[in-house]
Image (spheres, coloured by chain):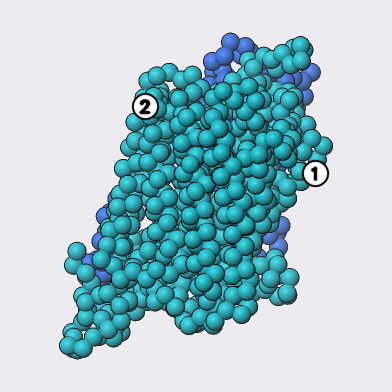
Chain colours: A blue, B cyan
Amino acid sequence: MSIFDTLSQKPWLPSQEKKDNLHTGQSFAFESSRVALICFLGSITALFSLFFVAYVGRMAYGDWRVLPEPFLLWINTGALVISSILFQKAKNLSNRFIFDNAKYYLLAAGIFAILFILGQFRVWNLLNSYGYFVDSNASFAFFYMLTGLHMVHMLGGLVVWIWSISQIFKSDLSYTKLKSTIGSTAIYWHYLLVVWLILFCLLIVT
Amino acid sequence: MSDAIIPEREVEEQELYHAKSWWTEKVFSQDAKIIGIQYFCTATAIALIGLVLSWFMRMQIGFPGLSIISEGFYYQAITMHGMIMVVYFLTALFLGGFGNYLIPLMVGARDMVFPYLNMISYWTFLLACLVLVASFFTPGGPTGAGWTLYPPQAILGGTPGQESGIILMLVSLSIFIVGFTMGGLNYIVTILQARTRGMTLMRMPLSIWGIFTATVLAMFAFPALLVSAIMMILDKTLLTSFFMPALVEMGEQLSYGGGSPILFQHLFWFFGHPEVYIVALPAFGIVSDVLSVHSRKNIFGYRMMVWAIVAIGALSFIVWAHHMYVSGMHPYFGFFFATTTLIIAVPTAIKVYNWVLTMWRGNITLTVPMLFCISFIITFLNGGLTGLFLGNVIVDVPLSDTYFVVAHFHMVMGIAPVQVVFAAIYHWFPLMTGRMYNETLGRLHFWFTFLGSYLIYFPMHYLGLIGVPRRYYEMGQTEALYTQSAADLNVFITLTALVTGFAQIFFFINIFWSRKYGAVAEKNPWQANSLEWRTPSMPPSHGNFGKELPVVYRWPYDFNVPGAKDDFVPQDVSNSEVELAEGYEGTEIKAEQT
């Protein structure tokens, strides 16, 4: 049902009344938490898009300096990709309620994500030791700020991950809740990977 | 009524959370109704601070010779008054207050979908308010940068509160946004996923459409404020140069360089303009419902009203730069934004016409909520028309930074939404407390508020037209331009503002007295159709509805349906259950064939 079909309904007509009386009152046939996640991702997309617009807008000014790209960033990116793949694997298994195998994938996905965050901190250290401080140039400031924000969002995901880990290793677990949480967190994980890839591309190109 | 079987919901109705102690029932409550009232109280309390600040400003403007406040405090009062009223009062009240109270009741749900998140949302909002108020007690006081917080002056020496006030303001806004996002997710998901049977989107009351669209706007607009807040905090604390250009302060070269203050303006107004509609759309929706009920007529052009809400919401994202005409933009840029600004006037005008046509030949009862709705239409029309003036570059340039602008935005997004707040509180007061308000006090409050606010803001248009600049602590060397008549008018405005402000005491006395001693309200006292009035008890108990959720058979505007005995048919009454008028026995009522 498209939004245009909905908006062109005439709820006062007897013919429409018959159809409307059969409505379950639910707009999407999937879980509420999934709808919330999609809305939340929409909001974060607005946030990061505006940062990217500000980044490109600020770049046009004459004082912009190019930031070096330490090789470690490629390794970090690799860790995040592996983390995302492992999370997807965990999601696929938990969708089939095979939690015994899923838990190891879930654990590994989180560990790779933590490695990514530690790697990003190491990149900060490296850049600082080269003399690229946050207040030296807007491009460095953008790098620190955007990677920092990305990490904050990763940490948010890790909180949910810790909850899932604490549940999945229990003997009396609530299967449907866990399955839905792992499913939603996996989407969030992939989303943050995409954000990172765009951010990384922006950094390489400029 | 169709006999077909209603399909099962894909997702089961969720289990309702039941409080276990007094603390979790009354204070850390997860019930949307209590959270809504908590939002009401907090937003009203902080609005009173904003009101007192405006008295200080008016005293200074009306009687500059007395020097009641210092220059610094004047700017701090301007800033805090603006930010408090726009964000912490109106946004929080409409979405947090009315959103929480009305959404579950009007869509026929027992509570919000994520009650725990909802509770955290309120406490985060309270924290944001406390951080904001804390800035009054820090060294240097709150920020005096103006509510738009434009850099570079917002964080430079000479601006009051540049020591810590500005940081607290930005931190408070960031906390507010985080809290709002949690609440906003709840509003959207509850409206989309937790409606009762038969409640299609196009059978929702317009209040819900307004709150829903405003929440969607806020979810996309507040990130822009968050972006600018984060970048400005970094500029202030870590000396980055996102917004800060190379500057010499007191003969000393600062370490900033290359930043763009205009970038901040774009980000700020990309939030700031949708913000106007975040406040206005719920007000539009609520007015539509209250008008329809008290005119005993269906809302004129329901579909058109929904389209207008959605269209205004979409258009509100492409008009932001009309707040920046004097920033030195390219003329074609200004041309584009002037055009979009005029286009957004079309759906807005449709709404005004439809409200008037709803009342046309209606069976109007001039209750206090109805009076406030009518005065809203008049005020909003006035403010909207001056918006057309200011939306055009060539008219805006000379009027910019004069009292004309102050008059415009107070009319359109100060007074107009506040009148809706009052209309809504009087309209739903019987539902919230189970008692009726005092009619005399209500009318006194209405006339003082309506006439008072008109007498405050209408003369400001004239002040603006003769060029009296806004934001001036006193006129000083510009006295040649500032005629005696303008000074007299300012004295008049100040006195009226004080009286109108104090007259709000009628409202508070009414609310506090009536909730204890008012006449006990009968069920559905306004004979309205929407579901919030169909709860088994009034005020609604935990879980809102009885054992079974209501089933919806019609839209909420079935007033004076031909053949029906009463002049209203509530949403949960099926055609076969409608009591028929004499002469219509044996038939079934027909919905309007328009």
Query: Which dot, 1 or 2, sits closer to the camera?
Result: 1
- Residue at 57 percent across and 54 percent down: it is B500
In the displayed structure, B315 sits above or below B509; it is: above
Q: Give residue B239's position: percent from left, percent from top.
A: 73, 23
Q: Is residue B290 visible?
A: yes
> How packed is label 1: few (under 14 Cα within 10 Å), some, or many (20 or more)?
few
- Residue at 18 percent across and 86 percent down: it is B584
Q: Earlier in the sequence, mark 1 or mark 2?
A: 1
Q: Give residue A180's position: percent from left, percent from top.
A: 55, 57
Q: Quadrant of residue A119?
A: top right
Q: Secondary structure at mark 2?
A: helix
Residue tagged by mark 1?
Answer: B137
Q: Nearer the viewer, residue B510 or A141?
A: B510
The C terminus of chain B lies in quadrant: bottom left
- Residue at 49 percent across and 19 percent down: it is B328
As drawn, is A187 to the left or to the right of A63?
left
Label 2 marks a residue whose chain is: B
> How packed is label 2: few (under 14 Cα within 10 Å), some, or many (20 or more)?
some
- Residue at 56 percent across and 44 percent down: it is B492
Q: Nearer the viewer, residue B177 or B549?
A: B177
As drawn, is B485 to the left or to the right of B68?
left
Label 1 marks a residue whose chain is: B
The N terminus of chain B lies in quadrant: bottom left
In the displayed structure, B258 sits above or below B589; it is: above
Q: Is residue A184 visible?
A: no
Q: Nearer the viewer, residue B253 or A108?
A: B253
Q: Quadrant of residue A55?
A: top right
As drawn, is B377 to the left or to the right of A65?
left
Residue tagged by mark 2?
Answer: B336
Name the residue type under label 2. Phe
Q: Secondary structure at mark 1?
A: helix
